[in-house]
Image (cartoon, grey):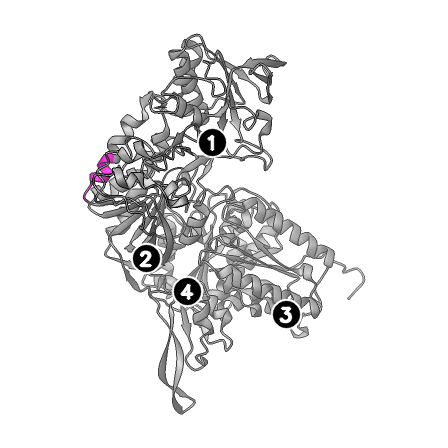
Amino acid sequence: MQRIGVFVCHCGSNIAATVDVKKVAEMALLEPGVVHAEDYQYMCSEAGQEKIIEAIREKNLTGVVVCSCSPRMHETTFRKAAEKAGLNPYMVEIANIREHCSWIHKDMEEATKKAVILTRAAIAKVNLNTPLKPGESRVTKRALVIGGGIAGIQTALDIADAGYEVDIVEREPSIGGRMSQLDKTFPTLDCSACILTPKMVEASAHEKINIYTYSEVEKVSGFVGDFTVDIRKKARYVDMDKCTGCGVCQEKCPSKKAPSEFNRGLNTRSAIYTPFAQAIPNVPVIDTDSCIKFKTGKCGVCSKVCQAGAIDYTQKDEIVSQKYGAIVVATGFDTIKLDNYDEYAYSQSKDVITSLELERIMNAAGPTKGHLERFSDGKAPKEMVFIQCVGSRCADDRGKPYCSKICCMYTAKHAMLIRDKYPDVNVTVFYIDVRTPGKNFDEFYRRAVEQYGVNYIKGQVGKVIPQPNGKLLVQGSDLLDNRQILKEADMVVLATAIEPNEGVRKIATMLTASIDTNNFLTEAHAKLRPVESPTAGIFLSGVCQGPKDIPETVAQAGAAAVKAIGLLAKDKLLTNPCTAQSDELLCNGCSTCANVCPYGAISYEDKEVNDHGIRETRRIAVVNSALCQGCGACTVTCPSGAMDLQGFSNRQILAEVDAICR
Amino acid sequence: MSIEAKEEFRPKIVAFCCNWCSYAGADLAGSSRLGYPADVKIIRVPCSCRVNPMFILRAFEKGADGVIMCGCHPGDCHYSTGNYYARRRMTLLFSMLDYIGVENGRTRVEWVSAAEGVKFSTTMNEFVEKIHSLGKNVRLGDLRCRN
């Protein structure tokens, strides 16, 4: 029989205001095995933990139940306290009477009743707990960063500077990401390329950083400290070692009609291409969909003009398998598709563009060499209208419910840059709210309004109608003036909502990292663990976790790197001892469990067993506790009931069921 | 049963929640103060695939009026594939339970992610309401368990 102590936390008034904590403690004393029960203001405080330690020592407790907040919050705290007192930490169970009780119920009597039942269930479980000992696993001192934008580059640099090997996997032909597409950055108006390219160069020259561009993560297995990742290096058809990056092949390529991804389809590129001039690596790839050689078999111009003999049409995709201790996701974002927002005439008029397209237009290396002009007729615009929150802050499922965060600022930037370079162009911005919470952000926005005379109108645009004369009629409202507005514009720029990059869900699934309904990766704790995924060993960097601007992304990238370094610095990790175990007397070696195990943790051995005096050799299942992650799939699938999960055993869960239904 | 002792029906409801998604979703419902009836009691399991049909049968045998199992959305399982096994098992179990008289409304599978506090709360409210409309579960109650 266990000797159990029950500790009921008031959590200030968080629990005590709706749960009669004294009554919970009192009722707990009536349960079998309970020899001690008390309540205290803050169980997680130093003094509270001391109470637990004292009681364990004085009353010789063999089990502890803490009735407090969620085990996801303080289970570790209380386990450590128990360990301090010499009790096995796995003899501690938490009754969640805050998140699952006091916070959601208003009636004191009802909440108290429920708290008593939840406590009863935890006591019933502890009665069946057994001491568990965590195993150890090794740590591969190498990190993988998925995504080579500013987030991935910064994370990789920080990890590499700490002395660990880092691989960056980037699916595009060059690293650089979204930031490389930007012209200027707010609120300082630095040139984006000027601050990004040195970082790109630094990453590619770093002796500890290895970059796989034009590559994708194909498969991930293993667990924290010991992941195995298959990376697909897509065939470039250009030998990375031989190519000198002279660019002659791109010049001479006769197929120049493919839309340039880098310029958002605003102009075209050759079939053999590097996305932009400062690309790293400066080695082109052949786009087989538009290459004449691949389509018809006749051409081969690039191969003929290449002095280095780097073109290789027979190259095949290559799979590289590598081990990693930590994985950082930095997959970034894209703008949403505008199919649901046809009222803005994006598909009908070439002069309705997204902000990212404007970014390319403003850029000296862009499709118009930096000249602001209409794509329909090449004329310079005189009236420009910016529409904010296109797809952001949307109440229905047409768009995104969240604020994309960066649009207010980049629109102020665009407006300012246009007014600066073309003072005769009128700029009008339709907005719902202008949000400028950031260092020097509001000052920047005010400059746009006060110094550059940008016309901000609070109100939404209902429709953009292309006119026969080539102009765009913008129908909007001015909420402050309470009037309808009809405005003729030459160009309309849509501040399109951002969303996590396509394919992030697939990556999240491979990593078993949680992801929310908007495809942003979920952090382990919204406030206290913002750069870690709930899945151990997976870290989050940049917009894959939520909308953010460049400084925030860089800060988060550094934070993710620190977390990854903290993991890589360890030689060994303690493994979760809640693993499956097979009862050799019940197991008949049928292999059903091995078939459902996602980790390949189950193997079979011929073992001599003593079944009621009969000695015989049987084929039985053996669980490798270093590989087992404790999901319990095998325990339910086992037809003979031989498999059980430590810490969540059949008897323990049944005891909880019984206690709740009593 | 005496005539005047017609008490208000308070169902016993057991909710199995996987540690990674639904338990966290329930926590989020809690910290967001999104209420649901106190009749729901949550049991934490590592994964929905840890829920043995035996646990559910036992709950009904011991007088539960409804059992709900919540896990990560298909494809999002922390252990890759656990919720697929759970889904298949529960489909079979629930149809068997229905056959022996435990109506389909008393059992439910719902996928709730860690970010879906609202969904957790609405699901529980709906489920409790459903159980109220079905009334007490008498079919599988073991007479020996009655007080």
- Image spot of residue A39 (x, y percent): 46, 53
Task: Work out whether mark 4 precedes mark 1 in sequence or the reverse, and give the earlier one.
Answer: 4
The kind of residue tagged 3 is Glu
Q: How crowded is mark 1: few (under 14 residues within 10 Å), some or many (20 or more)?
A: many
- Image spot of residue A396 (x, y percent): 60, 35
> Mark 3 or mark 2: which is in front?
2
Q: How crowded is mark 4: few (under 14 residues within 10 Å), some or many (20 or more)?
A: many
> Mark 4 or mark 1: which is in front?
1
| Residue at the far right in the pictured view | B3
Closer-to-camera residue (B146/A378): A378
Q: Determine which of the numbered discs, if any, sits on residue A404 in the image.
A: 1
Disc 2 + disc 4, Cβ < 8 Å = no
Q: What element carries label 1?
A: loop
Q: Do labels 4 and 3 share a chain?
A: no
Q: Is mark 2 on a helix, strand or loop?
A: strand
The kind of residue tagged 4 is Gly
| Residue at the far front in the pictured view | A298
**B82 on left or right of A188:** right
Q: Are marks 1 and 3 on the same chain?
A: no
Residue placed under numbered mark 2 in the picture: A228
Task: Work out whether mark 1 precedes mark 2 in sequence or the reverse, and give the earlier one.
Answer: 2
Q: Are marks 4 and 1 on the same chain?
A: yes
- Image spot of residue A465 (x, y percent): 60, 20
Residue placed under numbered mark 3 in the picture: B61
Q: How crowded is mark 3: few (under 14 residues within 10 Å), some or many (20 or more)?
A: many
Q: Determine which of the numbered discs, if any, sits on residue A63 in the image.
A: 4
Query: Residues in magenta?
Result: A201-207
User: Could you tell me how far apart the alpha carbons at marks 4 and 3 are, in whole angstroms?
Assistant: 29 Å
